[in-house]
Image (cartoon, rainbow, N blue to C red):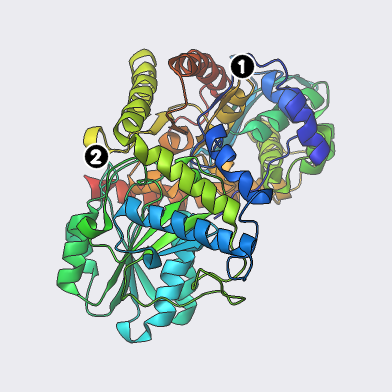
Amino acid sequence: MSRVPLPYTAKVLDLFRNPKNLGKMEDATVVAVAGNPACGDMVTFYLKISDQEVIEKATFESYGCAANIATSSIVTEIIKGLTLKAAWEDITWKKVTEEVGGLPSIKFHCGVLAVGALKRAIRLYFEKKGAAPEWLPKDHTFEEKQALEEEELAKMLSKRLKTAEEEKK
Amino acid sequence: MVENVKELLKLHEGIKHEVYLDNENSTVVPQEVLDAMLPYYGKLAYGNPTLTHKPGWEAFTAIMTASKQIAESVGAKNLEEITFTPGETEANNLALMGAAAANPQKGKKIVISEIEPINVLNVTDLLKKQGYTTTKVPVDKEGTLSLEKLKEAVDKDTALVSIHLVNNEIGTIQPIKEAVEIVKDQNPAAIFHTDASDAYGRIPFNVQDLKVDMATLSSFKILGPRGTGALYIREGINVERILEGPIGTQKLWPGIENTPLIMGFAKASELAFSNFNANVARMRYLRDKLVNGVLQTMTDVKFNGATGDRRSPDNANISFLRCEGEALTIELSLKGVYVSSGSACSRRLLQPSHVLVALGRHFSEAHGSILMKTTRYQTEEDINYVLDSIPSSVERIRGIVGSTGVD
């Protein structure tokens, strides 16, 4: 257990102070969540997708730290106008991390989570449609796996907390 | 990376008012303390206290005087019972590892509370390698140790018990006197250590009255300089050095004594105790103003820890629901209000504060927790500024959270 210095970039702080595309989207085509409040990091993406499979608009909500808010904000900006295929292929956690000017390594998972939520949203779109395109891999990407792992850990924590809570009663 | 931080600092330019409430993690050292330290860097007592010249003898006198003063402040019998260490972490390491090494015949069990400071938790983890097992005694929802469970945990194989006097995160005062009685009743040979860093200068206590065998004190927690602290070890309790090197006046801590820091620690202690009641009343007044101000005006907030006489007078720990703590510390920093959080994010771990988890707090309560400690140097105006800054900061972060992460 320890604390490490967190030298956030000015870009991260700027996006934290002035996040773009913040808030719930009532007419979203798909909504996807990644993370869990037990981890202290959770993000929801709302995507408006056209019939041509172009992302017309993306918004987010984040229960997370400055890095989570900044990476989520940048994802909603850079995917706007992209086709789902382009968004799937171009947006990686590394790219997102670069876009915010870098992150302390301990905060890489925040960008991973944001991209994990995006990939889930794209998958969900095709699931709802009932037909997956050829370019969409069946196996989970790195970011999706990481999001799952974090959520599993949160579930374990959650169980432990619940037991502790019951004992106090 | 340093360049990043320089940029971040630039964003803080133009702050109108600054209030430092993160006295848990470091403090401002008052001018009076600095003034008391400075002469020892160049005017007097700059020698090594074990050497045969004037600056050496001056240093010896200074350190012995400081030692006697610290000894008296906790009711120790004599100055030999005080060992200066580089701080709370080192004192706790010396207490547990040093007592374990010196008393191999006493059994292989250690008993602590589940909300001990991190350095105690880490040392007991380290002692596993030497065959020790540790039992963590639970606390209730306000953080008070269960004396029943303590009794169950201690037996003839218990070598060491380490339970803090005041919790550093939630300010709950532990029933140490009763705990010592129970432990000694179960096993008179068990050694009882208490980390009293967060009690010192805040609640009155005396090692004779508590009957503890060892007690840790920290300089910075009483607004002295960082880098020094002390371990009280009752005469007759065997503790071995855990580091080797040249031995001077401190038989259990090798290396050349840091006279200016020790003198700063002694000055901070003098200031804390010369006006003890007024100092405590001041901390409590400001803390209550802060806590009441938040609880009475904001919704979805929860106070963590014990209340009234069972809580340290300086400690305020509040959870802001639907609000992530690290984000809130940054938002407040940009307004000149400096606090820390028990959030997983600010702890670089997935798990939030082990103390709040032990109280049975929900995730959102632990992640949205903010720790603030008042000092006698703060003003009413400072607290008003904090009370003005918190609601808008919390509201902005809650705006980002929206409907996400509400469990």
Along the viewing direction, whichever of B303 and B93 lies nearer the viewer: B93
What residue is shown with label 1? A25
**Secondary structure of the residue carrying numbered label 2:** helix
Asked if marks 1 and 2 touch (Cβ < 8 Å), the reply is no
Residue at the image position 22 percent from the left and 51 percent from the top: B175
Establish if B129 lies above or below B135.
Answer: below
Quarter holding the C terminus of chain B? top left
Within 10 angstroms of label 1, few (less than 14), some, or many (20 or more) residues? some
Locate residue A122: give its quadrant: top right
The disc placed on residue B310 is 2
Along the viewing direction, whichever of B288 and A14 lies nearer the viewer: B288
Residue B306 in view here = yes
Chain label for disc 1: A
Along the viewing direction, whichever of B359 and B293 lies nearer the viewer: B293
Left or right: B86, with A19 as reference point: left
Q: Position of residue B247 (x, y in %)?
A: 57, 75
| Three-letter code, disc 2 | Arg
